[in-house]
Amino acid sequence: ALASGFIPMEIGTDLGGSIRIPAAMCGVVGHCATRGIVPNPNPTYSWPCCGSFVSRTFAKMLDDLLWMSRAGPLARTVEDVTAMLELLGGEGAA
């Protein structure tokens, strides 16, 4: 939608390139912000477990992955990403 011009800006989450790589492939700009600059929309979940050690370990791993992801802006120009980062992170974020 962003690359097609349907929307001007968007927020994405990044753990291993989920903002930057698709943005580069689609001809738009994506910025994976430093942790803490943009509030992360991912909450910590209580994963249903059957009580086994493997299930508890897997649930903990999923929570850790969600915590490590970072949010950041995507837009069609660097200027738009900068403006969005300033809005999301406050003054001095960009």
Image (cartoon, helix red, strand yellow):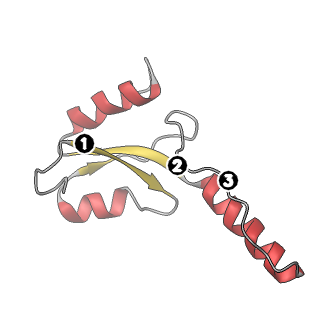
User: In the picture provided, is 7 more to the left or to the right than 68?
Assistant: left
Which x, y percent locates residue 59? 74, 70
Picture residue at 36% right of the left edge, 57% below the top: 20
Residue 26 appears left or right of 33? left
- Pick the quarter of the image with the C terminus: top left
Q: How many marks?
A: 3
**Callout 1 crowding tier (Cα within 10 Å): few <14, some 14–19, many ≥20:** many
- The location of residue 65, given as percent across then percent down, is 64, 62
What is the spatial separation of the Cα atoms under label 2 and label 3, in whole angstroms? 13 Å
Q: Earlier in the sequence, mark 3 or mark 1?
A: 1
Q: Which residue is mark 3?
A: 44
Q: Residue at x 37, y 32 (%)?
A: 85
Q: Amino acid at mark 2?
A: Arg
Farthest left residue? 5
Is 64 left, or right, of 49 in this rendering? left
Quadrant in which residue 93 is drawn: top left
Which quarter of the picture shows residue 68? bottom right
Which sits earlier in the primary sequence, circle 2 or circle 3? 3
**Residue 9 — which label?**
1
Q: The disc labelled 1 sits on which kind of residue?
A: Met
Identify the secondary structure beneath mark 2: strand
Q: Which residue is mark 2?
A: 70
